[in-house]
Amino acid sequence: MKNLAIARRYAKALLLIGKEDGKAETYREELEKIAHIIETEKGLERAITNPLYDAAGRRKVLNAIIEKLGLSKMMASFLLFLFDKRRFGFLAHINTFYQKMADEIKGIARAKVVSAVALTDNAEKKIRATLSKMTGKTVVLESEVNPSLIGGVITRVGDLVLDGSIRTQLFNMRETLKRGERV
């Protein structure tokens, strides 16, 4: 829990800097880019965070990544600051918090819809419109297909889960019938 509080603090600080200099969206993209690379290349993360390696050598590796990605001066300073404070291992969590806070500031809600079959563009538009009306935010929709649902959809927006799948309805019917048999 303490680690998440630390990550949230660094994300908030970067976002405040981004709001101040008007580059919050640039920092969002750069942070996402480097977090993705570090997450997918575990050897790279170890090369930067493992204290068994020389600190100067680890810093060179980080500087090479920063240069190769062409990151902004502010993002480079932020990443080197994380490195110096031995907080670089929190990068994935910092990115997650930054993305959520940046979405909140822009009035964006991210939703995930799982359906038994691929949704049509029209169905996605209707779901997006309904969720926008419910949340009062612009909704970015991510769709996934799961044939085991049989039919219907399961929608997640933040902590809210709306389960309209046939599988769940059948399960609920079965439970109702079981309770009725015992009475």
Image (cartoon, rainbow, N blue to C red):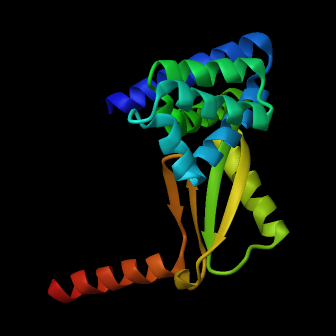
* Residue at the image point whose x is 69% and y is 23% from the top: 76
Residue 176 lies, with reference to residue 106, above or below; the image says: below
Tell me, yes or no, if residue 157 can be seen here: no
Inspect this view and state whether residue 37 appears.
Answer: yes
Q: Residue furthest bottom?
A: 181
**Quick check: 148 left or right of 71?**
left
Quarter in which the C terminus is drawn? bottom left
Name above or below for residue 159 compared with residue 59: below
Residue at 48% in and 43% down = 46
Q: Nearer the viewer, residue 148 or 135?
A: 148
| Residue toward you, 134 or 140 | 140
Q: Is residue 66 left or right of residue 41?
A: right
Q: State whether residue 172 is above or below residue 23.
A: below
Q: Which x, y percent locates residue 3? A: 37, 31
Which residue appears at 45% of the width and 76% of the height?
A: 168
| Depicted 86 relative to depicted 159: above or below | above
User: x and y percent of residue 45 in the render?
Assistant: 52, 43
Which residue is farthest left?
182
Residue 164 percent across, percent down from the top left:
55, 70
Q: Quadrant of the N terminus?
A: top left
In the shown orientation, is residue 33 left or right of residue 173?
right
Say which of 133 and 91 sits in front. Answer: 91
Q: Residue at x 56, y 18 (%)?
A: 81
